[in-house]
Image (cartoon, helix red, strand yellow):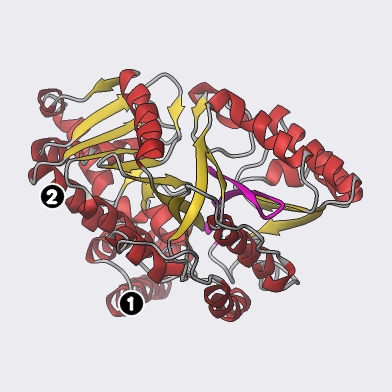
Amino acid sequence: MSFYLLLTTLLHAAILGAATLRLTLRENISSPARLAWFIVVLTLPVAGAVLYLFLGETFLSRGLRRRHAALAPQIRQLALPGPEITPTPPAPFRYGRSINGFPPVAGNHARLWDEGETRAAMIADIDAATTAVNLAYYIWLPDRTGTAVAQALIRAAGRGVRCRAMADHLGSRALIRSPLWRQMQAAGVDLRVAMPPQTLLGLPILTRPDLRNHRKITVIDGQTAWIGSQNCADPEFSPKARFGPWIDIMLRVTGPVVNQITLIFASDWCLEGDGALTDFALPAMPQPDGITAQARATGPLERPDSASQMFCTLIEQAQDELTLSTPYFVPDVPVLHALKSAARRGVRVSLILPRRNDSRIVQAAARGNYRGLLQAGVAIFEHGPGLLHAKTLTIDGDLSFIGSTNLDMRSFDLNFENDLLLRDAALTQAIRARQGAYIAQSERVALDAVRAWSPLRRAWNNLLATLGPVL
């Protein structure tokens, strides 16, 4: 054996050994995720170790962690209890409070808007703003919708309204590089980029490069918030137009829960630059005949598994019916088992997914779970045309959960997400009716059809489902 071959062999063994040892010693990782990474590292000897180095762990710069550690107790202190909720709120509210310290608060109003009217109504709210507009989006494009929102911010800043806007470095890169971004800045809109690369010697290695701020937040005057799945972009979504239109869902919310949403935005704002949480007013007060609501924020700086455990708590709450829509379905094992368990105990569980997904790998991984879900009694519907991007969950005609979180490991572990949990029969029925419209445009997946898939297709789907924790 030549010297160079021996050296290469020893180096290869050292890389494999280091990656394997790190995986073995690592805590806060599920057994399926650990196994999935073992498969990647061992089947792609050098490339697998490199992938694990950059994408295997949720590492962030010390600066981000330090700032978050300082902000978290302040948020909990500012998230003062609202009007007392009686009787004791359901378990999902109690679990949700353990994540950010936000209590369930009464006295809120929420309206589900028709998809075609949402953006015009939001712009009208910005045009009526008198004190402050705070806006954050994962994807903000310089298209018709993105330009209209930017121009509304420019108008608001021109009449003296304090306007803050934040866009994710990756998802909104087209806007950040465009003249429109500079026009907003010149007009007095305070701009920040979320999750920019944290570099060392010019290399983006201090923070994992695919950690993203996936939130979608608009707050006007501290009194009105828009929350849901819609990015600041046209439904046709030009970067992936062949999958369009994107089908989204949005709520307009008023009441004290808006203070919690403001705190989520404020924490992101302060995480990315100067400022203090006390710079943000929290004026929203309870309203008569309001409903119970609670905001929720998860991300790689929060407690591990909090998003997954929140979904498990929600699913376990269901007694009669649970309907769920998500564009990306690659859940962890606990959520998958919770769905099966709910169906087996007699809950009518319906899962609505896109028929065509913009990620063929994610779609195959989702279909790798179909057989087990169908055998447990879960009804699966594949929606078309367009890409169903709405993230919704309704429970027993009473509870609704809506926001930015997908049912996949990226949303669970890597993305900064924001959602809203609400308890109200009328609103839940409205969202359930929207889900019913999605189902009416869907094709129900039959167990016999899944069983008839070719061995090659089943093998591919099952392999990607096994690798779901690393997707």
Q: Nearer the viewer, mark 1 or mark 2?
A: 2
Q: x%, y% of residue 326?
A: 37, 39
Circle 1 — which element?
Answer: loop
Would you say 132 lies left or right of 208 here?
A: right
Residue 425, by quadrant, is: top left
Whether residue 80 is visible, yes or no, is yes
Q: x%, y% of residue 143?
A: 71, 30
The vertical placement of 411 against 402, above or below, is below
The vertical placement of 317 against 42, above or below, is above
The vertical placement of 269 against 115, above or below, is below
- The magenta region covers 209-227
Q: Which mark is residue 174?
A: none
Q: Nearer the viewer, residue 269 or 12?
A: 269
In the image, what residue occupies the spot 59% across and 72% down? 206
Q: Nearer the viewer, residue 103 or 300?
A: 103
Crowding at dot 2, Cα within 10 Å, few <14 / some 14-19 / many 20+, comes out as some
Would you say 134 lies left or right of 7 here?
A: right
Location of mark 2 (residue): 341
Q: x%, y% of residue 164?
A: 75, 55
The amino acid type found where label 2 is placed reads: Ser
The amino acid type found where label 1 is placed reads: Arg
